């Protein structure tokens, strides 16, 4: 989802000579692009930042299954249903790769999940919007996964080995997500007038939240990625014959980029604060799934223990 | 009361016949069978493997980062272990 490069937490303003030997060795490894592995010494701030960022990323993958999962039973054909299930299952996989990467830092899965359920840990705000029609499934794959890919590629190079390896795996699987979304949009746009209107409506609702996925304009890299996303997505919408909900959007030949209108950041901050259309619903659904699954987790563990004890007795 | 979480397993996948198993990541599972089933779903959704090993993380013995020097540095000075240590005259072929 969102995510900037991991800050090492080491104060870069400090000269290497002023650092302790461990911190210095750490900083030199990061500067030389040598990956940091879980058992290596690392500054506490780096460990904390990583746990926060990786777990928020994991939560986003898991909560991100909900808006799309909403349409699995109502997919318009068996083919679309199978594809959507595979896509949503991939997102579960992404969540699991990332939880496992976070756990290498010494935090437990249960703790991470508890933090999400208590509202202490965040997930990407984009998933607090509802999926009102089938076209939303197309728009999400095309725009939301498209924006996620752009945000995630730099993370494949991040300094922490397990996070970097998890992200390489994630990125390999994302392009299927974006293409299946665009394919849905193409089918709708080549269909009846009503189907095309449905695609346009989905684009209208997902366009601005997708641009917000690159984060506030406080970092140059956020705006650069956002611009790149706009530049590559507008011609795709042109191909589909639908238009971005932005009257100020136009090609700027001088800059060689599309100009676009102002983003309503108050909307994002409002969603982050918990007041998006689906915040409460998403969290409730997760908590319910966790609580209702508790007896399964317990029974599976009890069964495994019983069998292990029996095997020991027999030996 | 909720019991403790399922144990952690390290997953190794053989990607093709003839290659060695390679560590791909970890997951939680209550027992070995479930570890294999979960590994199938988490790590081989696109024909990434022909064989899976699941090993309890608690059973893995690993070197510590601090041991790197004493363990691996002795090999640095033994350059005669590499064939390039022995220059061969141009006239000598097939060696
Ligand atoms: Fe994902
Ligand atoms: Fe995705």
Image: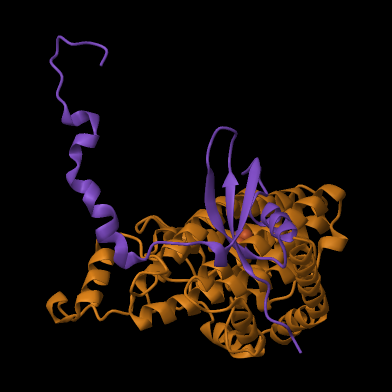
Q: How many marks?
A: 0
Q: Position of residue A299 (x, y in %)?
A: 82, 74
Give the image location of residue A266, x and y in percent.
54, 87
Quadrant holding the N terminus of chain A: bottom right
Instruction: Give coordinates of residue A255: x percent, y percent.
Output: 35, 59
Image chain in purple: B
Question: Is any part of residue A230 visible from this angle?
Answer: no
Could you tell whether A179 is left or right of A293 in the image? Answer: left
Residue depicted at 23% across the width and 70% down the height: A25
Q: Is residue A84 above or below residue B49?
A: below
Compare residues A140 and A26 and report the one nearer the observer. Answer: A26
Q: Position of residue B67 (x, y in %)?
A: 30, 63
> Quadrant where the C terminus of chain A lies?
bottom right
In the rendered image of the structure, the colour used to display chain A is orange
Protein image colouring: by chain
Above or below A97: residue A289 = below
Would you say A60 lies left or right of A157 here?
Answer: right
């Amino acid at each position: 989802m969102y995510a900037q490069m991991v800050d090492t937490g080491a104060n870069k303003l400090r000269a290497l000579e002023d650092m302790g030997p461990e911190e210095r060795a750490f900083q030199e490894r990061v500067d030389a692009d040598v990956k940091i592995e879980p058992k290596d010494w690392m500054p506490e701030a780096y460990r904390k930042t990583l746990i926060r960022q990786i777990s928020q990323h994991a939560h986003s993958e898991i909560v991100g299954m909900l808006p799309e999962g909403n349409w699995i039973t109502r997919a318009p054909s068996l083919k679309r249903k199978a594809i959507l299930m595979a896509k949503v299952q991939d997102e579960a996989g992404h969540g699991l790769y990332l939880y496992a990467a976070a756990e290498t830092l010494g935090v437990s899965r249960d703790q991470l999940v508890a933090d999400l359920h208590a509202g202490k840990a965040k997930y990407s705000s984009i998933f607090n919007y509802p999926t009102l029609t089938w076209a939303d499934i197309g728009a999400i794959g095309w725009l939301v996964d498209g924006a996620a890919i752009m945000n995630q590629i730099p993370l494949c190079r991040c300094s922490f080995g397990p996070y970097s390896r998890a992200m390489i795996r994630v990125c390999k699987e994302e392009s299927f997500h974006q293409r299946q979304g665009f394919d849905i949009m193409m089918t709708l746009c080549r269909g009846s007038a009503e189907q095309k209107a449905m695609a346009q409506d989905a684009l209208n609702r997902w366009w601005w939240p997708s641009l917000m996925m690159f984060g506030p304009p406080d970092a140059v890299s956020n705006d650069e990625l956002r611009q790149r996303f706009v530049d590559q997505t507008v011609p795709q919408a042109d191909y589909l014959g639908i238009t971005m909900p932005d009257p100020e959007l136009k090609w700027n030949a001088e800059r060689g980029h599309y100009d676009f209108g102002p983003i309503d950041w108050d909307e994002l901050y409002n969603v982050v604060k918990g007041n998006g259309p689906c915040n409460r619903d998403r969290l409730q659904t997760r908590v319910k799934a966790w609580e209702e699954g508790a007896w399964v987790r317990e029974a599976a563990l009890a069964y495994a223990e019983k069998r292990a004890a029996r095997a020991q007795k027999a030996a | 009361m909720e019991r403790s979480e399922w144990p952690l397993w390290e997953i190794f996948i053989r990607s093709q016949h003839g290659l060695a198993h390679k560590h791909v990541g970890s997951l939680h599972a209550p027992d070995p069978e479930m570890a294999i089933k979960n590994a199938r779903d988490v790590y081989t959704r696109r024909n990434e493997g022909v064989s899976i090993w699941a090993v309890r993380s608690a059973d893995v013995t690993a070197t510590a980062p601090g041991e790197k020097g004493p363990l691996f540095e002795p090999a640095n000075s033994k350059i005669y272990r590499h064939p390039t240590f022995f220059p061969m005259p141009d006239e000598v072929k097939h060696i």
